[in-house]
Structures are given as structure tokens and as C-alpha cells.
Image: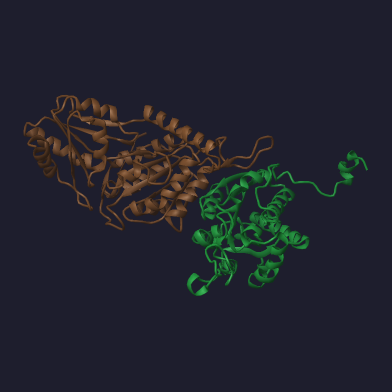
Amino acid sequence: MKELRLMKGNEALAEAAIRAGADAYFGYPITPQSEVIEYLMMENPADRTGMQVLQAESEVAAINMVYGAAGCGKRAMTSSSSPGISLKMEGISYLAGAELPCLVVNVVRAGPGLGTIQPSQSDYFQAVKGGGHGDYKMIVLAPATVQESVDYVKLGFDLAFKYRTPVMILSDGIIGQMMEKVELFEQQPRLTEAPDWATVGKKPGRDSVIVTSLQLQSEEQEKVNLRLQAKYREIEKNEIMYETHQCDDAEYLMVAFGSCARISRKAMEMAREKGIKVGLFRPQTLYPYPYEALNKLADKVKGVLCVEMNAGQMVEDVRLAVNGKTRVEHFGRFGGMIPSPEEILNALEQKIIGG
Amino acid sequence: MSENNIISPENLVYSKTEVMTDRVLHYCPGCGHGTAHRMLAEAIDELGIQGDTIGVAPVGCSVLAYYYFNVDMQEAAHGRAPAVATGIKRVFPEKYVFTYQGDGDLAAIGTAETIHACNRGENILIVFINNGIYGMTGGQMAPTTLPGMKSSTSPRGRDVKTMGNPLKITELIAQLPGTYFVTRQSVHTPGNVRKTKRALKKAMEYQKLNKGTCFVEIVANCPSGWKMTPVQSNKWMEEHMFPFYPLGDIKVPE
């Protein structure tokens, strides 16, 4: 049965965590995502599903609690915002190295440093290019609506367990704080059977399970790296998601993700009213990135404008995808500033059409 | 006496516990880790909880502890073992969970995780090996290095004016309402080994009560790090470490 509610992004995401059958949430307050843990504490999911919720002493402790619970084969998650995510990067690297599934939500605010609590997309590099140390990737899902924030919680856990890897939802202060109509999925059961890689207590007749990211021998560590890389190639083959809007007859293309894609869509509609044939390409997965789809679109257009709430991060992947076939320009507002549709249209006319 | 007679059950006075694997320990000759491992393993064995125990290894000399304990184990990032153990215990409250950490791991980089896990009263056992030095990285100063004690990063001896004071974290932990049993032991004589094992067994058993964190410090020698023979190091430990870190129970259940 459909359950429609008007919900704030962060609260809808927290509700989705309970409904996705999460076993544990560990977090630490930080604006603009504190509603996630507040909602969970108020809702007390231990009574509804048995899900455990704990406010940790730090972001660092929270991600390591996630590691412990994930190592037990449980659906574990944490959420934070940019400065807190930086602190979690050590733990995320260990999770990737130990091949543990988990869900990490980043409701991005502008940086660097303490920055501001206003929304931004300036953690793109950190999310998709590494962030922590070592050769690893995490799947990065970029919601543009409260609805997608909800749906990606379920998808995120599924992907995390399918590939035994950390998954990040790269949201931002706009999506986390705004209220929208959302359709909630039905309550999913919590996991009952532990995977064979989980520490559940050694059973007679089997070797003890060891969860570790340590290999002292280089030969063994390289094998781990090769296994991880093979996994990433599978992810790149199977899990790319993107949306296109009015790209069929487009002479120009805008590329944007998350909340910025919504504003760009409005700019696209305004351009169309003026007779400018522009389309919009919206990656929903930032890793794996839809390089091929974007490359094909580049054949048909005279220029590409990448619109972001940062100083130019995803534009590097857009350039890799377009591979010189046509011009690629970047337009961004940052530091917590949000571009208006008029500004974006103006940038399209100045930088791409007139440029 | 033939070999068959020696291994016949009535003649056996000692056998290796099943809770230790057959892997050769990588620890230096004379180091206390092996004995401390075995006492914890024997305690788990005697309590019959091998299949219900999950351990957390630290970063430091005992980083490979998971090769030696024959129980399911997780390897934590440096200092984060109490947080990892919290995550395990929260999803498996019925399991027995322990961390095994050195002084750098527990009392320097992981101080926050240690104090807060204890302050929440997580129902876990924290085993703390205190030898006053960073062994694995080659003998650098630890949070528990004694005043005047030489290490590779305090080559003229620890100057407390510039390098700070050694941290008596066990006494600090005992102040927290979340801790249930806090004790300091050693494994350098047969008598002390027996006491340590009793403490570890009690501490594991207490987890059933859900009364809070149990914390067992084991003051240990580090012949390699201290640049001494094993015998010298045990003597030095008695003369210098024990006066500063006195052995005995610090907090016992009422």
C-alpha cells in the first residue's frame, strides 16, 4: 500500500533506514543533518524493528562502531556533514579494505574547514576520488529529491551487501532540510542469516572468521587490491544510473547532479521558452560515473555546461567523458551560495552559446 | 615412561588450550604478550564460551592477535577498538566481546574511544597491555613511558616538562560510573600469571551480568624496546614500573 507523507529530507531518510531493515545507526550531531539521529532517537526503532541507535562520542567513533556492526554481517549506517565526513574517512578506508558493507550519508555543507552550514556540492572529489587512504572506491548515490533520499537508503544497503563495500549517499543541505511529498516503501525485514564472512562466534568445525584490512606481505596485499579492482569493474559494468531530460533534439547540454540538477532543469525550461535547444544530463551515481552515456551525447551537441555548487569538481569527469569532442565549461556558485535558474541560463548563453 | 604414557590423560598436567591456534607467535623472546594471550584464551576455554566470543585486535605489537586467538575477530584501526567492540556488542548483546590493546593504542590515539566506551558502561572486556613503550614501531615514547625513561623519541629520558607526564589511565577509568571491575596485574612470575588469569576469567564472566565495562591492565615488559634481556627487563619492571603502576584491584564489584 502506498504511504504518502510530507517529510523533511533528513527525517525521511531516517525513516527509510528503519524501513530498509537497518540493524544499527551510529552518529554524531552536525548541522545540517542532525535531524537524522534526532528522528531515530524519537522514533525509538528498537521497539519497531530492533534497530539499535547510538550517539557516539565522535564521528571517528561512529564510523568504527559501524565497522564493528558491519563486521558482524549487520546493516549498519552513519550520517554526517562535510567536516564530520572528513573525520570518517579513516574508517571508510578500513571498511573498504576489510570489504565490509555499510551506508554513509553526507549531507554536504560548504568548506573548506568549518566552512558554513549552508548547502554545497564541494565534497564531490572526496566522495568519488578517494577521500581516505589507499586504492579504493565507494559507490556514490546522488539524490535530487527527498524521494530519492528515501529510495537510495534501500538501494544503498542492497548495493553495499551485493559488493561488500561502503556506499555513500551524497546529499546536501538543500535536500536534507527541505520538505517534500514522499512515498515510503514498506517495512523490510532485518537480516536474519549472517553471511559467512561475518564474526558471529566461531562454530565448531569451521575456522575462525577474521575481519581485517591488514596484509603484511606485499604479494598478498596486491591480491587484495586486484580483487577490489575487479569488484570495482563489476560495479562500473552494472550499477551506473543517470537521467536525461530533453536531450533528443538538444544542441547544447547541461550536466548537473543532486539539488543543482533541479535548478538546472528550471534553467533548461527557461532556455527552451527562449528557443534554445538545451538538454540536461543528471548522473544519479557519481561513482560509477556514466562516462559512456555522456560521451555519446557529446557527439550531438555544440557545447556542454557543467553546473555545480562548487568551484569545479565534477567538470573534470565531464571533460573525461566528453574527451574533447566538444567544449566543456563550468559554472558554479559556492561557499553555501545557490545558483538561480537565471544565473545558470545566463552562464549557458555567455559561456557556451555566445562563447 | 613411554611417550604413550606421557600423553595419557591421567599423566597430563598441562595442555594447550583449543582457544589458541597452532600459529607460531611473532612476539620477541621474553615478551609478555604470549603469556597474556594464553591466559585470556584459557579463561575463555574454561568458561566454555569460545563459540560466543568475538575479539577485537588493535594496532601495535598485538595487531596480529587474531592469528593466535581461535575465536572470531576483527582488526580495528589504531585506537578504535573500543568503538568497534561497541558496534559488535550493540548488535550482538548476548556475545562476549573483548578488545586487546597496548598503551599507545588505548591511552594515546584511542583515549577518547577508551574513556567513552567505559563511561557508557559497554558490557565488554578491555585488556590493556602496558609496557610503557611503542614496541612495533621500534621503541618510541608511549603515553605510559615513565619520567626519565629512555626511548627512541626521548633519547635523553622522558622530560615531563616538555613531553608531558605518564598517564595512569587505569586509575582514571576506575573513576567512571560505567566501569564494573578494574584491576592491574602482571604476567612475569607464575604467581602473577595465575592472578591475571583469575582476573581475566572473572572479567569475561561479568559480561553476563550487564553491569558495565571490565578493564584488566597487564603491566608487561618489552625486552626489545627497553634494550634489555628478558630477565633484566622483568627486574627493571619490578623496580621501576610497579612503584608507578602498583598491582592489584582498583575497582571491584560491590
Question: Where residue A30 appears, x then y in whole percent?
Answer: 35, 56
Above or below, comparing residue B1 to residue B202 in the picture: above
Residue B149 in percent (x, y) is at 59, 69
Classify residue A266 by image quadrant: top left
Q: Quadrant of the C terminus of chain A?
A: top left
User: Relative to B16, is A268 on the left or the right?
Assistant: left
Q: Residue A165 at what x, y percent from top left?
A: 45, 38
Q: Between residues A308 and A30, which one lies in front from this camera angle? A: A308
Q: In this picture, is A352 found above or below A58? A: above
Question: Where B149 sits versus A314, above or below?
Answer: below
Q: Residue at x 41, y 55 (%)?
A: A28
Q: Which chain is green?
A: B
Image coordinates for residue A95, horizontal then vertical, percent: 47, 43
Image quadrant containing the N terminus of chain A: top left
Q: Is residue A197 visible?
A: yes
The answer to whether residue A23 is left or right of residue B46 is left
Please name the color used to draw chain A. brown
Can residue A75 be seen here?
A: no
Identity of the residue drawn at 50% across and 71% down: B164
Q: Is residue A323 left or right of residue A78?
A: left
Looking at this rendering, what residue extends furthest in the right direction? B1
